[in-house]
Image (cartoon, rainbow, N blue to C red):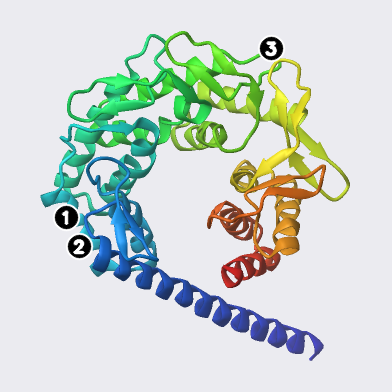
């Protein structure tokens, strides 16, 4: 009888939690639809909605479909098929990347090329694939540097490229999108170009296997030699692990394993209750700075994907304590001084992403409750 009562209680708790989760999910979905409808009303065809003035702006001289393409995969996940079909039709029939405009290679690869690849993976619409390949070919012109590291800017129409100074992520975080494009087109040139850039950065690591944060793509010289996991370097680390997991390239695996070992050895600063990843000198491993940014909160998710849930949980708890202390995350926080130097929050999703990965991996409702708090506070 006692076991039956416990089983019934457990089932009631489970059903209650499931109902709460469904309610939360529906609330998030409604917020997304409200935001999307507002974008369509005031900024359709443009890159950015300015919500306070109900105006729009674009990243470049001409709009490049950034918001619709970026939003598409979220719509598919949420089951918003009508809105997703509108974007698919728009991309297949009405957009063109033959624009005489210089764009940021990194941003166009991650947001637009990545979004188009997601769209094709859902639809297998050959018109969408043609648009995706067309953009990939235009971005590929940026990789024609002496080192293979792409230029910061590339003109989508002329193929001319410029901008020798790039951060580590801008230099070597292309293997996912370019690799998937190679998979769909059966043409290895995209992955080969992206991997060459990654090898060019990794090949210039220090003897202790750390990389810097800014490099010259023509000479291969490090212009800034600080090692850290945050903005400017984050996607480099993210792409190493995810590329290995997706494509099973053994060379990439070796790069990831050596890199993450070095990060834990030299960049981690750990106590009994917290763990931070500081900025260090890439050659000596000595600390340079104890300021972290809220972009760094992506790292628990990456550690979780790497089957390092214990360390991921401790790091997530560290960031969660900062959220609870201020009600939101500060943009820049000095963990040694225990105070923010930039007390603003720009709706960054990294800490929320990490909470989701940890919940999905561990099924520990602690992380579900974190997600609820973050959403409610925002």
**Which residue lies at the image location 75% right of the left edge and 58% below the top edge?**
321
Q: Is residue 171 left or right of residue 100?
A: right
Quick one: 85 or 64, which is closer to the camera?
A: 64
Q: Quadrant of residue 193?
A: top left
x and y percent of residue 324 in the render? 73, 64
Are circles 1 and 2 on residues that touch, CB within 8 Å?
yes
Does residue 55 sit above or below 307 in this rendering?
Answer: below
Residue 175 in the image, given as x and y percentages of width and height: 42, 30
Q: Residue furthest right?
A: 272
Which residue matches tag 3? Answer: 207
Between 10 and 211, which is closer to the camera in this rendering? Answer: 211
Q: Is residue 334 visible to us here? A: yes
Question: Is residue 186 visible from the viewing direction of this image?
Answer: no
Name the element at disc 3: loop
Image quadrant containing the C terminus: bottom right
Residue linked to disc 1: 90
**Residues packed near mark 3 inside 10 Å, few (<14), some (14 to 19) or many (20 plus):** few
Q: Residue at x 65, y 31 (%)?
A: 228
Q: Earlier in the sequence, mark 1 or mark 3?
A: 1
Q: Is residue 337 above or below residue 267?
A: below
User: What x and y, as percent, mark residue 4?
Assistant: 74, 88
Q: Could you tell whether 306 is left or right of 200 in the image?
A: right
Disc 2 target residue: 86
> Which disc number belongs to residue 286?
none
Q: Are marks 3 and 2 in contact (CB under 8 Å)?
A: no
Secondary-structure class at tag 2? helix
Q: Residue 134, located in which quarter of the rendered image?
A: top left
């Amino acid at each position: 009888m006692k076991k039956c009562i416990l089983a019934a209680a457990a089932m009631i708790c489970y059903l209650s939690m499931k109902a709460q989760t469904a309610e939360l999910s529906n609330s998030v979905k409604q917020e997304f639809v409200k935001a999307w409808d507002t974008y369509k009303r005031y900024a359709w065809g443009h890159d950015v909605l300015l919500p306070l003035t109900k105006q729009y702006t674009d990243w470049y001289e001409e709009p490049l479909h950034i918001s619709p393409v970026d939003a598409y995969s979220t719509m598919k996940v949420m089951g918003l098929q009508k809105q997703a079909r509108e974007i698919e039709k728009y991309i297949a029939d009405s957009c063109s990347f033959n624009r005489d405009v210089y764009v940021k290679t990194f941003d166009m690869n991650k947001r637009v090329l990545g979004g188009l690849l997601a769209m094709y993976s859902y639809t297998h619409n050959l018109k969408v694939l043609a648009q995706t390949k067309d953009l990939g070919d235009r971005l590929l012109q940026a990789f024609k540097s002496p080192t293979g590291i792409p230029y910061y800017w590339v003109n989508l129409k002329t193929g001319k490229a410029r901008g020798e100074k790039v951060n580590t992520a801008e230099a070597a975080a292309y293997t996912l999108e370019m690799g998937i494009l190679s998979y769909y087109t059966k043409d290895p040139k995209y992955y080969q170009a992206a991997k060459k850039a990654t090898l060019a950065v990794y090949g210039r690591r220090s003897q202790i296997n750390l990389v810097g944060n800014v490099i010259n793509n023509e000479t291969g010289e490090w212009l800034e030699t600080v090692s850290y996991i945050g903005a400017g370097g984050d996607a480099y680390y993210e792409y190493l692990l995810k590329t290995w997991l997706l494509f099973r390239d053994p060379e990439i695996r070796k790069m990831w394993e050596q890199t993450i070992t070095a990060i834990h050895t030299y960049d981690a600063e750990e106590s009994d209750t917290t763990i931070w990843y500081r900025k260090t000198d890439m050659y000596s491993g000595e600390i340079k700075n104890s300021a972290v940014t809220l972009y760094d909160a992506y790292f628990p998710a990456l550690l979780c994907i790497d089957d390092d849930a214990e360390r991921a949980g401790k790091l997530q708890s560290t960031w969660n304590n900062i959220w609870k202390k201020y009600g939101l995350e500060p943009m820049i926080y000095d963990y040694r001084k225990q105070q923010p130097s930039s007390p603003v929050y720009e709706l960054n999703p990294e800490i929320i992403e990490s909470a989701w990965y940890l919940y999905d991996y561990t099924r520990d409702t602690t992380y579900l409750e974190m997600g609820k708090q973050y959403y409610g506070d925002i």
